[in-house]
Image (tube, rainbow, N blue to C red):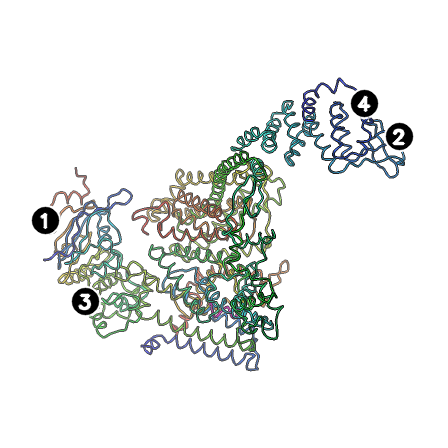
Amino acid sequence: MRQGFLYQNPSVLWFLAALGLFTVSVVMLSEVTGVAVVSTSFVKTLGKTLCLCLVAIAMDVVWGYCGILSLGHFAFFGIGGYAIGMWLMYARTEMIVLGSLEGQVIPPTPQEVSDAIGNQIFGVVGSSEFPLIWAFADSLFLQLLMVVLVPGLLALVFGWLAFRSRVTGVYLSILTQAMTLALSLYLFQNDSGLRGNNGLSGLQNIPGFEATSQAAISVVFFVASAVALGAGYVFFAWVVSGKMGSVIKGIRDNEARVRFLGYHVESYKLFVFTITAVVSGLAGALYYPQAGIINPGEIAPIASIYLAVWVAIGGRGRLYGAVIGAAFVSLLSSWFTGGGAPDIPLGFYTIQWTDWWLVLLGVSFVAVTLFFPKGIGGLFDYLVRKP
Amino acid sequence: MRAIFLAFAVLCGTCIKVQAQDLQPLLQTHAEEVAKPSRRSVGVMLDDLVASGLPQVPRFLEQWAGRSVWQGPDGVFFFGTEDGDTLVLEDVDSGETRTVPDDGYTQLRPNGGVRRVIGTALVQFQLADPDIARRQSAVESIARRPAADQLAPLVASIDGEADEELRARKIQLANFLTARFGETAEARIEAINSLAADTSVEARSVLNQILTRDTGVASTEPEGNIARILDPMEAPDDFYAELVEAGFAPAQTGPATIRAALEANIDGGTVGGVPLAQLSTDAARERAYAALARDGLAPPLVTQTTRDAALAAFVFYELYDEDNAAITEAAEAALASVEQRVAFAQAADLALDGLSLASIYFLAAIGLAITFGVMGVINMAHGEFIMMGAYTGYVIQLFIPDYTIAILVALPVAFAVTFAAGVTMERLVIRHLYHRPLETLLATFGISIALQQLAKNIFGTQARPLTSPDWLSGAWVISDVIQISYIRIAIFVLALLFLALILFVLKRTRLGLEVRAVTQNPGMAASMGINPDRINMLTFGLGSGIAGIAGVAIGLYAKVTSEMGADYIVQSFMTVVVGGVGNVWGTLAGASLIGFLQKGIEWLNPSNTLAAQTYMILFIILFIQFRPKGIVALKGRAAAD
Amino acid sequence: MAMLLEVSGVSVSFDGFRAINNLSINFAEPELRAIIGPNGAGKTTFMDIVTGKTKPDEGTVIWGERNISLLGMSESQIAMEGIGRKFQKPTVFEAQTVRQNLALALHNPRGPFAVLTHRRTAKNAARIEAIADEIGLTGSLTRTAGELSHGQKQWLEIGMLLAQEPRLLLVDEPAAGMTVEEREKTTDILRRAAKTRAVVVVEHDMEFVRRLGCKVTVLHEGSVLAEGSLDHVTSNQTVIDVYLGRAHA
């Protein structure tokens, strides 16, 4: 079956080849091999971009293929980040605390260790007690399970509620946006148990690998992100091809027809919504150790809208479009806002891109929606059709 | 003494004129007390002064208390002002002044206790002062620092009070004082009972003063007016700490104490016979500590059992400072009744808050309801139109210094600006995206981020003030509990005006008719000579223009920033969706529901507005499960798609 | 002839307007039936009720030998029970090929996981070929449905219904916008389909109904006005009044 699937979807092979080539070149040029053409911080940026591409694919499946404009997938991404961040922070703080308690004549009790860790982590929000949601923070395995389960369950419950009451179209978008807003507002509270607006930090330090250089860690995460992106791409390409793809595209184009053909449309939407949420969570779990910090601002509704913007600019309804959009816009965005773009002096006024990039993005986004609804990916149609 | 005060008060209106006597001789008869007053002796002298009824007395008392009375070498008293080495003296009776070198003159410095006594004596004069401002300040100074001896002069001054308002205030204050310091228990209880209907902060504080209590611990139940006996098991550790503080029990041995004791008694790798390496559990530590205690190296371990036994052996109680149980009972009853009234008043206040929040949501959402509800167009830039209106108001205030005129100009200008912006957006973007609602959502979102950043570039990131005119500042105070700021009332009125205006436009005008026609069947409307393009443009302009006006209103009570629109957009969508799309009444219902509910949730958890918003949104998500079409739902086939 | 669907005493109103008023109507299997009636007679609402889109205020809808009530079942459950519905406007998945459209409709497990792991089989391919042949789209299997002509889309939709293997086919105005030849072909397809199942055609066009040559039910103001052969009902005075728009007392 796999052969048949790849045979029908040659673009998947092309994508994997390009991704492989890209990954190998970046690794060869990184500081790890000594070539050091690509700096460690840029490796991190590229690794993060790959994670963004992965969540963009998920977004594309849910929106471009299934027609659900979810404004909540970046929230799932953030939840994944928080879930892994809890372990990273706990394990690292535990190590530091144990190290500092080492010298004491009387060995510490578990309670004393836990109190000290709690004090370290929650001191910023004026607390030292471990909230219930940190119950599994000491276990990497359980927290990894959380990366999958929490976004999955949230999507399942939310989706079940929303789809069963037949909330569709823009209503659904607004409802998902409300969910995202509620989540970010919740996380902003100091007593949410996740350090309020301080968020979780120091995530770039991987417990157990203190001796390893950030250069090596960044390359490992970069490769892991590339593998995840590749796997995610193949998985979703497989999902959206064949009969499943037929059904979900059918739901996008004419929900009622699919329903009268006997398909339980809600189950399909729920299925798509949930698996894309899970993949978003995984992408977030890979992203935030590279970013080093996660705070509630990352989850704000605006982030999910940007996700939709990437997919729209890249070209929705085609997986590589989402990848192109996410990579292109997010890299361009960091180039412009990072001061990489030269200012334009107009004599009476100087256009500083740090100030004007968002204006440019907004306007070009309107232009894409109006004039190039197929996005950048639409250009490939011309290339393919020409010969 | 009180009797004298009373007599004086009755007489004072007439006696001043009758007796034109000098003060100085009187002072000289008490020269010793005046020069070196003590708290005990000063009373007799003051009584004499007051009894004399001389008009100079109040002034003298003030100057005396203010350390401005000097005694000459010959024993004569003067009002004096120091000026370098010289002294400006004023005769206490004639008011003649002369300047002398300060040699030989002594400044009288009555101590704090004496000054207080003088102050009290002064109150009666001030309470009856011809100048109303002085009378008021005397009354308020009593209100600030009520004391027992002010009661009589206050009561005495009531009859002579000419000003109605002040008289009422004096009666109220006298009542408060009677409740606390009245001579007989009956008088106090009567006064206390009369406070049961008074929800003012002052009345409540009077009752609470009467009910002040001390907590204490003793081995047997003490004598006195006991408020209640406490159950130490509710918070055993806290109560045990009290026992320790009172010296009735040894300090509790907490983990930290144990640890410190262990550390202090390390004996070659073991403590109390337990190897150090094993001390990583609480049980092992307690064992080691017990060994230490046995050897007398540490105080005995206070376990939970010993703690509870100690607690059981003592009575923890609260004792009223007031001894008379009848009075405290009456005060408790009055306070309970007051608190009930306060709770009602708070509910009313909360309702007013909810109403004003609902008005704001309504104003923010009604423009959206028109574009979203009537036209089916999702305008994510709606919030930015609100922001544009607010900034328009800000810019106009830069040019027009009179805030009242500025606001009156700002409202129509904001409407015009956002109307134009809305029409431009409709023509350039939205027109091409009808029937592609999701894309409209995204395109208008693009516009929204561009506008937001543009505002940031022009006005900077800091909040800009939009100042309301003076007549809008301040609040309408109904009682100490219920009050509402005028600005919120203005917003409420504005919301009502808009509701009426929009209903009028949609239901009673040609434009409204055409809008409804185009909404229901654009093809049919077009064939009847209505230009749907024009109608869509105007409708969108109208919705946007209202957002501009809402912006001015919101800017007046909140800050004007480039992000203010984003704060309202989700709430506004919620309002429209919850209320029911395509219906002005629905928007009103939605705004009311969300406004009241949010205030209600905030009331339940006042410390945390973020949590209130979170629960609010969760509620809305659930609400939509049960009424997907909103509160005011359109039914039937028309609503199907 | 066993009763396949029994609709009895069904009423539904929207905002006070009674779209269906105490409607009772039965279908046997196999049967070809035409339902005619002026605008607003409740034809579409009747189909909405049978297919589960609209819940009636009162009445019963009983299906099949086991006498199952269709009320309270979801659209997809009703479809799986064997009721296929063709919309007035051709609704096919325009972005997908004719083959994909038909494959989507084939009578196979409908659950997400069954669909996800679905594999092509020769049996299914043969079914698709057979249906394509039936509706005259054999040559167009690889074309995108959006490229088809109006008539072809209508046939494709009918073909999708056939692929569903329903026992009752509800067809809403299949001949609208068709040329004369296309109509003839449509009539043939429907008549053939009705040999093994119940086919209910809602139609405005009397000529088309005549060509179907079947029992006719006239709906008016949400209830049955007359029933019988076309000649029988067209000679009915009330039917004539209704159709000519004359006020009847």
**Based on the displayed image, in which of its 4 quarters is residue B35 positioned?**
top right
- For the residues tagged 3 and 2, is the chain the same? no
Counting residues from the start of the chain, the first of labels 2 and 4 encountered is 4
Residues B205 and B568: in front is B205
Q: Residues within 10 Å of mark 3 (few under 14, many from 20)?
A: some
- Distance from disc 2 to disc 4, alpha carbons, whole Å, reads 18 Å
- Distance from disc 1 to disc 2, alpha carbons, whole Å, reads 141 Å
Name the residue tied to disc 2. Answer: B74
Residue at 78% in and 36% down: B110
Letter of the chain that mark 3 sits on in the rendering? C
Nearest to viewer (mark 1 / mark 2): 2
**Based on the displayed image, in which of its 4 quarters is residue A292 positioned?**
bottom right
Q: Amino acid at mark 4?
A: Asp
- For the residues tagged 3 and 1, is the chain the same? yes
Letter of the chain that mark 2 sits on in the rendering? B
- For the residues tagged 1 and 2, is the chain the same? no
- The image position of residue C118, as x and y in percent, is 28, 71
Examine the rendering and report whether any part of residue A252 can be seen.
yes
- For the residues tagged 4 and 3, is the chain the same? no
Element marked by disc 4: loop
Letter of the chain that mark 4 sits on in the rendering? B
Element marked by disc 2: loop
